[in-house]
Amino acid sequence: MKIVKLPKENLAKFVSSLSSFGQIHAPVKRGEKSLAFGPVSDFAQIQLNYTRTILPLKKYFFKPIDTMFNFSAEKGYELPMEEPEQRNVFFGVHPCDIHGLKILDLVFSGRYVDNYYFARRNNAAIIGLDCIPDEFCFCRSTGTDFVDSGFDLFLSDIDESYLVRVGTSLGDDMVKATESLFRDIEKQDREKYKGKSIEKRESFQIQIQLQDLPGIMDLEYDSPIWEELGQDCLSCGTCSMVCPTCYCYAVFDELDLDASSGRRMRRWDSCLFKDYALVAGGHNFRAERSSRVKNRFFHKQRGFVSQYGRPSCVGCGRCKAYCPAGIDIVEVINKLRSEIRV
Ligand code: SF4
Ligand code: SF4
């Protein structure tokens, strides 16, 4: 992998140059404390030292609400014409969110390829940026604190400069387009990078053991923990909405007033919602809140492992940070583990 160095004083110029590769999106302030990925026109808007955005990048490729096709008695079915050539450059994506995208890529390229997702995903450049964990992050435990693919460029802070790993030919084009801004790396840069890597590893406040969790979950299928969690959970679905790897959606039709035209839509759904498992005839397979919370944990940490060989959690800490009932994924996992010990 090609590795170069970008002095920090050249970062603003480099980011501005990215606009020739597409619309730049980066973490920007939303209110006092919150951040979100949004379009930027000025480098000064970008928040470089952030921990997490409210929503992950999935909102761009798998939109919260989306038109699948339009229909009318006159024209039949028509795919929506939506800026098909719009290229986007996402700057400042953290390793856990890059892993989240890799999981969505896997899911949406499965048996039925999701063309809505890939039409946007294939037009996106990813510029990663390393980060320092806060009290909610546990990506080291999920093995997603580092990335070696899934980005065009990846920037790691080595004090006066960024060490830049070039992941794709598009990333290489970006560097070549502004070659005079970059420098070759030297011995002290390599040492700085290794030192920073140790610093990051040592700054994790949470460590959980996940390797043997699927087996433990099988043993704890009937644990009273699920009942306790069901009493606290508000079924608000926030944990699914903010999760970079949750991908459920509901499909519905919206009819125009003339009742002869309309559109088929899809919108994010959550297995925590009361009617998620409601079927024709009125039976609800997960009518109890406890069974819905249990389902979320089992899907992420058990079912997904069976299907894809890894859990569908990247340790971003969003569900823990934003759950209004204070349900903490790390605490739940630790409780499940300690139940086994006693
Ligand atoms: S965010 Fe918390 S309260 Fe809301 S559905 Fe998820 S676990 Fe339940
Ligand atoms: S389950 Fe929670 S911590 Fe894991 S990826 Fe989803 S939001 Fe992040």
Image (cartoon, rainbow, N blue to C red):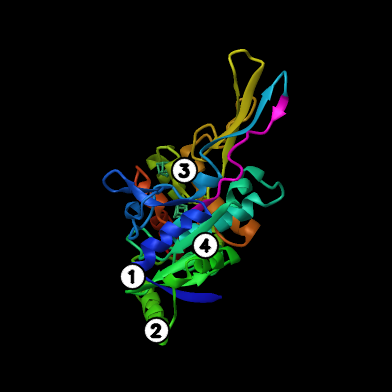
Q: Position of residue 170 (x, y in %)?
A: 57, 63
Which mark sits nearer the N-terminus, 4 or 2?
A: 2
Label 4 and label 1: CA atoms lie apart by 24 Å
Disc 3: which residue: 241
> Quarter of the image holding residue 187?
bottom left
Q: Position of residue 5 (x, y in %)?
A: 43, 75
Residue stretch in magenta = 76-89
Disc 4: which residue: 213
Magenta-colored stretch includes residue 316: no
What secondary structure predominates along the stretch shown in magenta? Answer: loop
Q: Nearer the viewer, residue 16 or 254?
A: 16
Q: Nearer the viewer, residue 169 or 280?
A: 169
Q: Which amino acid, mark 4?
A: Leu
Q: Is residue 68 above or below residue 308?
A: above
Q: Are marks 4 and 1 in contact (CB under 8 Å)?
A: no
- Callout 2: few (<14), some (14-19), or many (20+) C-alpha neighbours within 10 Å? few
Which mark sits nearer the N-terminus, 2 or 3?
A: 2
> Mark 4 or mark 2: which is in front?
2
Disc 2: which residue: 191
Label 2 and label 3: CA atoms lie apart by 40 Å
Looking at this view, name the residue that lies furthest to the top: 258
> Mark 1 or mark 2: which is in front?
2
Disc 1: which residue: 203
Q: Are marks 1 and 2 in contact (CB under 8 Å)?
A: no
Q: Please give the name of the residue rendered at 35% of the width and 43% of the height, measured from the top-left corner.
A: 325
Helix, strand or loop for disc 3: helix
Label 1 and label 3: CA atoms lie apart by 28 Å
Q: Is residue 95 visible?
A: no
Q: Which amino acid, mark 2?
A: Glu
Label 1 and label 2: CA atoms lie apart by 19 Å
Q: Is residue 213 above or below residue 183?
A: above
Q: Are marks 1 and 3 in contact (CB under 8 Å)?
A: no
